Image (cartoon, rainbow, N blue to C red):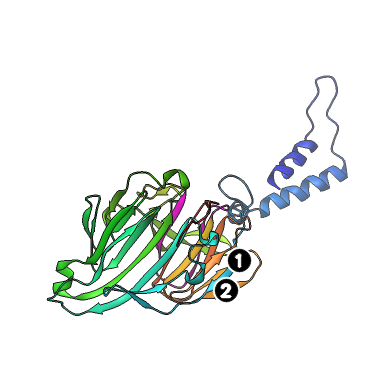
Amino acid sequence: WPGQISAEICGLRRTPSPHRPQKPMSQTEVAVLSRYILLAALLTTTTLATIAQAYSDDGSMATLRSVRQIMPQTPRHWVGDGFHVHPVFANKAFTEEMSPFLMFDYAPPTIFPPNSGPPKGVGQHPHRGFETVTIAFDGEVEHKDSNGGHDIIKKGDVQWMTAARGIVHQEFHSKGFSERGGTFEMCQLWVNLPKKFKMTKPSYQAILDGAIPVADLTETKDGQCSDEKVGNVRVIAGSFGETKGPATTRSPVELWDVTIDRKATVDLPFPPDYNCIVFVRRGVIDVLGNDGKSREVEPQGVALMKTDGGDRVRIIAKQKNTSLLVMGGRPLNEPIAAR
């Protein structure tokens, strides 16, 4: 529109000629020019901002991603004696729909009393061909592996272990946490490795809370982004706007820890060709799609988004202090040999 207005106004402009006097504009030309001057005056700063908001950073038209499926909370089971988890992906685990992610276990807040005996957890077990990503929301996890890795992650920390050609590890409540007792909350994700990295050397990344950058999350009002902060995004992997996560990944992966402080609507830009998964850790949300439909997701539920060309996810937080994990990545499109 602005370009059309400018072009048409410029089309009505007459350049004075040194050889002949300038002819006066006709009534028709005056009427057209007046109409566009009035229209330009109506295009206030807010209106132009609304038009700009309808486009992505690369100039293409921005659209919302729609929901493919809502996956409800699943029953819990014990992993060892220290992790009482929801198998979040249920029967979607180890499928191309979740690629590059394979599996997701979430242990909601659980109070463990002080323990004077051996720490609770899972003893030595092998992994091969993928990565395990453990996020500690509360409590402490102690990790040891056959590659020499030994670490304790605490509240807010992340451990990113690349099993690759093979590793044996164990995971227990830390000795200090076991003795003190307290609230324990964590999750573990398995990320598939592309074929070319499956036989590489195992490695380990300890990502401390202080090393994870935090981006402001602003409210979306009337379809456009405002300056009003309503939460934040901890960028563990990938990027949120100009904020890049510290995790080194072997394929394009996004992993964000999102907090929405109050009831509000927010837009999360997300690569349109990536699988996108929204997990509700705490609170209740609606996800509004490009099809105009709003789908509710309850605690420990998942919104599995369509890959329909949309480049942002619109979340409506229906409770204060809502917490989400938003994840996804470029599908590997490679066979999953074992599970």
- The residue indicated by pointer 2 is 295
Give left or right: position of 147 versus 215.
Answer: left
Q: What is the three-letter code of the residue carrying label 1? A: Gly
Please tell me whether mark 2 sits on a helix, a strand or a loop. strand
Residue shown at the point (48%, 70%) measured from the top left:
264
Badge 1 crowding class, 10 Å Cα cut-off, few under 14, some 14 to 19, many 20 or more, is many
Residue 73, compared with residue 246, is above or below; it is below
Say whether residue 268 is magenta: yes
- The residue indicated by pointer 1 is 289
Residue shown at the point (30%, 71%) measured from the top left:
185
Of residues 54 and 325, the one drawn nearer to the viewer in this rendering? 325
State the image coordinates of residue 262 (x, y, percent, origin top left).
Answer: 42, 72
Of residues 285 and 107, the one drawn nearer to the viewer in this rendering? 107
**Alpha carbon of mark 2 to alpha carbon of mark 1: how far?**
8 Å
State the image coordinates of residue 135 (x, y, percent, origin top left).
Answer: 32, 62
Give left or right: position of 277 versus 161.
Answer: right
In magenta, the rendered stretch is: 252-274
Residue 47, compared with residue 187, is above or below; it is above
Q: Is residue 27 visible?
A: yes
Residue 211, compared with residue 74, is above or below; it is above
Q: What is the three-letter code of the residue carrying label 2? A: Arg
Give left or right: position of 141 versus 326.
Answer: left
Residue contact at pointers 2 and 1, CB within 8 angstroms: yes
